[in-house]
Amino acid sequence: MNKTDPIRQQSLLQRMFKLQEHGTTVRTEIIAGLTTFLTMVYIVFVNPQILSMAGMDIKAVFVTTCLVAALGSIMMGMVANLPVAVAPAMGLNAFFAFVVVGAMGYSWQVAMGAIFWGAVGLFLLTLFHIRYWIIAHIPLSLRVGITSGIGLFIALMGLKNAGIIVANPDTLVAIGNFSQSNVLLGILGFFIIAVLAARNIHAAVLVSIVITTIIGMIIGDVQYNGFFALPPSIMTVVGHVDMIGSLDIALSGIIFSFMLINLFDSSGTLIGVTDKAGLADKTGKFPQMKQALYVDSLSSVAGSTMGTSSVTAYIESSAGVAIGGRTGLTAIVVGLLFLLTIFISPLASMVPAYATAGALIYVGVLMTSSLTRVKWHDLTESVPAFITAVMMPFSFSITEGIALGFIAYCVMKIGTGRWREIGLAVVIVALLFIAKIILVDA
């Protein structure tokens, strides 16, 4: 009886995930899931660090980050049967902590409410099949500008957290003190990631965080708090999201920004990963697309109610796909590993800000690489892309960067007599931002 159990189990998994049809095996899917997990587990260290800067309980956020990543990834595997893992989004967490809470002065409870309504908006766009219409009708130059601008903004936060750049009243910013250990370790962390990634080592970010934290421990910056522990309480963040208080006209642009950023980020990742897995057709459509979009948007709603930033599909899923992951079993393995990670909270509390700064800078490198896709010879395309990208870090606002980019696109096309190239989606978004500037910012 015992000898046949593994065979029956394998047969069950074969039927559930159609492994044979996808040309994969249980062993391959498990290895792919472990690979994807190792490339994205850094989020359980980085996300709590960033959200704690908004005043949130770092230990509670560690647990909710693990829970949301686990549940979202398992649902993606069960419902959509895709090798795509999900977790709280990099970029949106920085926008939440440094702009909405830090610069604009909102409480984290209200700001998290804005994330909730942005996620609800994303779900409604998915429900009414508007999501891909928007993506299809927003020009490549603006999509690239948004992605790259967020990358520059994240890199700015990484440079600041490591002390590599500091405020200066005369020049706005200046180089930090390179004799300080946090600056040197922040720089070291970044180059560890960059070198390992260039050598195709998938766990580069995790390796960098571990090495810089250990060095910090050796020089006395970090105290060892243990390895395993029962999960800390999450009640300091769960149930504290102010959904009513965030329904403020002054936050409408923020809510819209959360929705728009998550829309581009997650949809683009789903298309990219499924294309790499050979599951997508020439138009970007892939099997179980409807189910995947529902899981993605509902995970964002669930994440915000639990007190963590919007959830998105992770491009790191491509690491598991690269070694053969083809079905939802890969995503389920990732989810189960995130559940186990909940029990190592003492390790997460040890990680200093400079240990995760390198990851932020590296994400900036990856996100700004898409600028090569802009038609720089066509100023009606390159000027809006440039304005969108640079105004995010320079204005310290992702929302303003998006707004100015859409408005610039309309100005350039109309000014050169090419107004017919402006799509309805762009006009609607630009008018919404102009209304916000007139009614809210004035």
Image: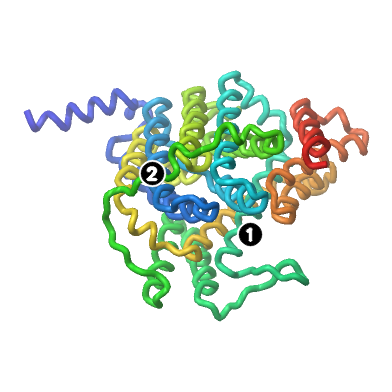
State the residue position of label 1. 156
Residue furthest to the top:
128
Residue furthest to the bottom:
179
C-alpha gap between disc 2 and disc 1? 30 Å
Identify residue type, mark 2: Ile
Residue 133 x, y percent position in the rendering: 66, 24
Residue 1 x, y percent position in the rendering: 6, 28
Q: Residue at x 13, y 30 (%)?
A: 5
Q: In this view, does 434 lie to the left or right of 323?
A: right
Q: Are the residues flagged by discs 2 and 1 in contact, CB closer than 8 Å?
A: no
Q: Where 347 sits versus 431, above or below?
A: below
The answer to which quarter of the image holds residue 259 is top right
Q: Which residue is drawn at 77% across and 31% down?
A: 432
Q: Earlier in the sequence, mark 2 or mark 1?
A: 1
Residue 209 x, y percent position in the rendering: 43, 62
Colouring method of the image: rainbow
State the residue position of label 2. 234
Q: Where 5 sits versus 225, above or below?
A: above
167 or 15, which is in the foreground? 167
Q: What element carries label 2?
A: loop
Residue 296 x, y percent position in the rendering: 49, 31
Q: Is residue 282 visible?
A: no
Q: Can residue 434 be seen in this view?
A: yes
Q: In this view, does 207 lie to the left or right of 431?
A: left
Q: What element carries label 1?
A: helix
Q: Please tell me whether mark 2 or mark 1 is closer to you in this view.
A: 2
Q: Residue at x 36, y 39 (%)?
A: 335
Identify residue type, mark 1: Leu
10 Å neighbourhood of mark 1: few (<14), some, or many (≥20)?
A: many
Residue furthest to the left:
1
Q: In which quarter of the image is the C terminus?
A: top right
Q: Which residue is drawn at 50% across and 25% down?
A: 294
